[in-house]
Amino acid sequence: MEYVKLFDAEYRVMQIIWNKEPLTSRELAEICLEELGWQRTTTYTMLKKLIKKCYAQNDKKIVTSLISREEVQKNESKAFVDKNFDGSLYSFIAAFTSDNDLDEEEVKKIQKLIKDSKNSK
């Protein structure tokens, strides 16, 4: 299935769904009012968009996700690197780490991630 980008507002609703699922559409509207200041109609419009994009479902007024947070993060990250760094993960990491001091634990985790990635191929 081809990845369909989430806009910021859609992502915010998905965050709520992932954190609270399963929940009723009414509960979702109440949470969106409390956390985002949205009226019920705005939440329901956003939910319809997420359903159309196959990110969520509303079955008998019970809302659940159809795609995991991790899958969305992976797709969003890849799209970001592709768009802003011509697909070069090295260029992204170089830009990200140039102004950020990584502590020893973070460096070890990144090294392990690279080692594990090389071993899985």
Image (cartoon, helix red, strand yellow):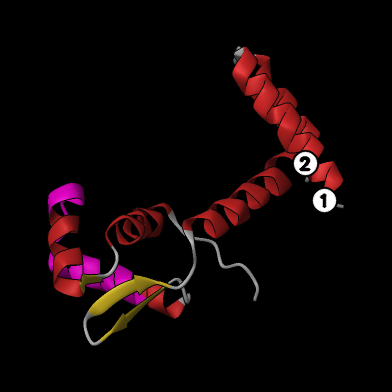
Disc 1 packing (10 Å; few <14; some 14–19; many ≥20): few
Q: Position of residue 33 (x, y in %)?
A: 14, 56
Picture disc at residue 51:
none
Identify the residue under disc 2: 116
Residue 45 sits inside the magenta stretch: yes
Looking at the image, which residue is at 34% across and 72% down? 64
Main SS of residues in magenta: helix
Looking at the image, which residue is at 17% across and 71% down? 41
Depth check: give the residue in front, 33 or 61: 61
Q: Specify the farthest residue to the bottom.
A: 60
Among the 4 quarters of the image, the one containing residue 52? bottom left
Looking at the image, which residue is at 22% across and 66% down? 42
Q: Position of residue 11 (x, y in %)?
A: 40, 55
Residue 96 sits inside the magenta stretch: no
- Where's the N terminus, which quadrant? bottom right
Depth check: give the residue in front, 79 or 74: 74
Looking at the image, which residue is at 77% across and 41% down? 116
Among the 4 quarters of the image, the one containing residue 20? bottom left
Q: Is residue 14 above or below residue 55?
A: above
**Residue type of the residue flagged with mark 1:** Ser
**Residue type of the residue flagged with mark 2:** Asp
Q: Secondary structure at mark 1?
A: loop
Q: Is residue 84 above or below residue 2?
A: above
The magenta-colored residue range is 34-48
Please report contact status of discs 2 and 1: CB closer than 8 Å, yes or no: yes
Q: Secondary structure at mark 2?
A: helix
Identify the residue under disc 1: 120
Depth check: give the residue in front, 75 or 82: 75
